[in-house]
Amino acid sequence: MHTPLFPAGQFTQPLAYGAGLREGGVQFAVFSRSATAMRVLLYDRVTDLEPEHIIHFHPDLDRWGDIWSVYVPGIAAGQLYHFQADGPFEPQRGHRFDGTARLIDPYARALAGEFLSASDGIVRPPKCVVIDDTFDWEGDRPLNRRLSETIIYEMHVRGFTRSPTNRDRHPGTYLGVIEKIPYLQSLGITAVELMPVFEFPTNHWLGRPETRPNYWGYDPMAFFAPHRGYAVGSEPGAQVAEFKQMVRALHQAGIEVILDVVFNHTAEGNQLGPMLSFKGLGNRIYYMLANGGAEYRNYTGCGNTVNGNHPIVRELIFFCLRYWVQNYHIDGFRFDLASILSRDRNGELLPNPPLVEAIGEDPLLARTKIIAE
């Protein structure tokens, strides 16, 4: 069964990419300009090493320009999946397709599993989770406090709630933040700024025991997905509901929620780093490349630089910000290394960066607190 998906107009239509619930099934949509074939891998369990089903996109019926879209009946929220793409492997030209790689959906709304296997040290991307965004917000509305009246408390979700001296029921989690609300109120603050909560790998790719884990989260891999490591529940997607519970409780206490967001680089690193998502779907699109495409421009000091003002990447970041405001009721954003968002694909500074202008002119985002550092 094939349900046509017409590409949405830039910035004007609801989110079309990713995994969307439809009557009786799920619509999968992913962008890839240079892929020659696309597949969705479906899994029954988080621990499965191999997919239970492989859905092949029909090259004519399931491709609309550069968007690959297929409807899969009989599956629902909670379904686990990866994308897999065939295409040219020409590193000297910036193409790094690998038809065996399992890829994270750039629009995945939750991940399940680990990035690095503890048993064999092999990097396997966590599985994406089809999410039902339905949630009872109990009438929650934006607090819309003036920036001049805002007192921000920066916090790391795990570090703030995991003190050995406290007796909280849920240390190190989103629900643990709720338990700390009386303390936050006693400080007189009006907003919390959460250090990165986009999904990120906690293990170093080398997998050496002596290598310290990635604690802070400044190495994201799924911009739409809250970090599963801060959830109490272990079932796939539990982090989505728990994050919303945290925001709802903070708002009820009169405290706004600002996210520290990292759009300047990803955990895929440079040409020596792993293939987890963007590299296997459109390396030349998603990253700033040098030397004809063979190397990555490293303005971030983290191995790669996101090509934020390319129309496709700009659309992804823009949709991401709107998604967090609409679906998580986020009140504002602090942009890590924000200057990257003012560069073109060659790294040159733009006088009027399209992404920055789009954020400033959007009727939804313009009402949020925007902090650039």
Image: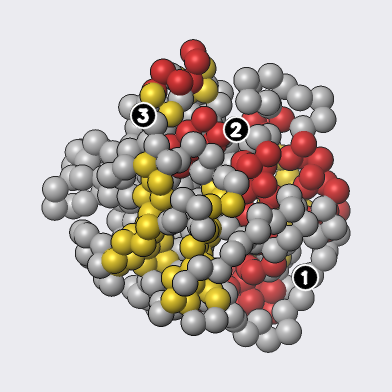
Q: Residue furthest front?
A: 60
Label 1 vs 3, first from the N-terminus: 3
Q: Nearer the viewer, mark 1 or mark 2?
A: 2
Amino acid on which disc 1 is placed? Pro
Residue indicated by mark 2: 307
Secondary structure at badge 2 equals loop
Disc 2/disc 3 C-alpha distance (Å): 20 Å
Q: Is residue 123 above or below residue 126?
A: above
Other-residue count near label 2 (Cα within 10 Å), few / some / many at <14 / 14–19 / ≥20: many
- Front residue of 175 and 362: 362
x and y, in percent, of residue 41 in the image: 33, 60
Toward the viewer: 38 or 323? 38
Q: CA distance from mark 1 to mark 2?
A: 31 Å
The residue beneath circle 3 is 89
Which of the labelled discs sits on residue 142, or is there none?
Answer: 1
Query: Which residue occupies 68% across, 86% down?
Result: 138
Q: In 3D space, how far apart are the residues under numbered discs 1 and 3 (Cα atoms)?
A: 47 Å
SS state under label 1? loop
Name the quadrant of the C terminus. top right
- Residue at 43% from the left image edge and 41% from the top image edge: 36
Left or right of 210 on screen, residue 337: right
